């Protein structure tokens, strides 16, 4: 995977550059990701927070996740495109929404998490390792 990625919201008010390779890329089928995307899963990539440079001002939404961590989601206040998120459990990391990348095909999902919440119609690559919840570190 490349160690340089760029992305933006739909309207272009917020742009970003990631100057490191993602640490992990995968599909999440948790109910929070379903609500935030309006579909069956989100495709996310985890990256070092200090490698992300953002131009523009994002709106935030915060909540407590099933893990007990405090989550903050960042999105464009103009077009509402989801861009990235952060967890109180991993202050040094960000979770970038792969769909916001200028070239989302440049990354490959490695796994599917929270399959216990999967919608029956949401079929992702069956060859990917899958986990009923969060991957244990």
Image (tube, grey):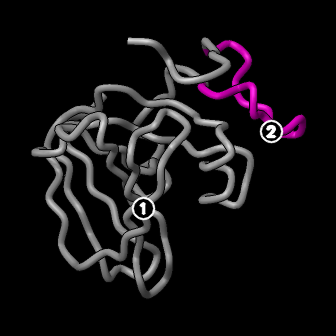
Is the C terminus in the top left, top right, bottom left or bottom right quadrant?
top left
Q: Tell which circle, 2 or 1, labels the residue nearer the N-terminal end.
A: 1
Mark in the foreground, 2 or 1? 1
Residue at horizontal 66 percent and vertical 43 percent from the top = 41
Determine which quarter of the picture holds residue 101: bottom left
Q: Which of the numbered marks, if any, corresponds to residue 83?
A: none
Q: Secondary structure at mark 1?
A: strand
Location of residue 121 in the rendering, given as x and y in whole percent from the top left corner: 88, 39
- Asked if the residue under mark 1 is in contact with the one under mark 2, i.e. CB atoms within 8 Å, the reply is no
For this orientation, the residue located farthest to the bottom is 78
Q: Secondary structure at mark 2?
A: loop
Judge the density around disc 1: few (<14), some (14-19), many (≥20) Cα neighbours within 10 Å. few
Nearest to the observer: residue 77 or residue 107 = 77
Determine which quarter of the picture holds residue 16: bottom left
Judge the density around disc 2: few (<14), some (14-19), many (≥20) Cα neighbours within 10 Å. few
Q: Is residue 33 left or right of residue 120?
A: left
Whole-Å distance between the Cαs marked 2 and 1?
26 Å
| Residue picked out by circle 2 | 122
User: Is 124 a magenta residue?
Assistant: yes
Q: Is residue 12 left or right of residue 15?
A: right
Is the N terminus in the top left, top right, bottom left or bottom right quadrant?
top left
User: Is 117 a magenta residue?
Assistant: yes
Residue at horizontal 28 percent and vertical 44 percent from the top = 94
Q: Is residue 128 left or right of residue 18?
A: right
| Residue picked out by circle 1 | 62
Magenta portion: prevailing SS class: loop
Q: Is residue 100 above or below residue 78?
A: above
Residue at horizontal 61 percent and vertical 49 percent from the top = 32
Magenta-drawn segment = 113-128
Determine which quarter of the picture holds residue 38: bottom right
């Amino acid at each position: 995977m490349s160690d340089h990625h760029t992305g933006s919201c739909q309207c272009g008010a917020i742009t970003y550059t990631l100057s490191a390779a993602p640490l992990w890329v995968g599909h999440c089928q948790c109910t929070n990701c379903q609500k935030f995307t309006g579909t069956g899963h989100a495709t996310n990539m985890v990256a070092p927070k200090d490698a992300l440079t953002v131009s523009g001002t994002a709106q935030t939404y915060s909540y407590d996740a099933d893990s007990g961590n405090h989550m903050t989601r960042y999105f464009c206040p103009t077009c509402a495109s989801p861009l990235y998120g952060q967890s109180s459990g991993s202050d040094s990391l960000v979770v970038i929404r792969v769909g916001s990348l200028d070239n989302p095909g440049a990354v490959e999902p490695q796994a599917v998490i929270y399959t216990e919440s999967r919608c029956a119609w949401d079929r992702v690559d069956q060859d990917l390792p899958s986990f009923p919840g969060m991957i244990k570190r």
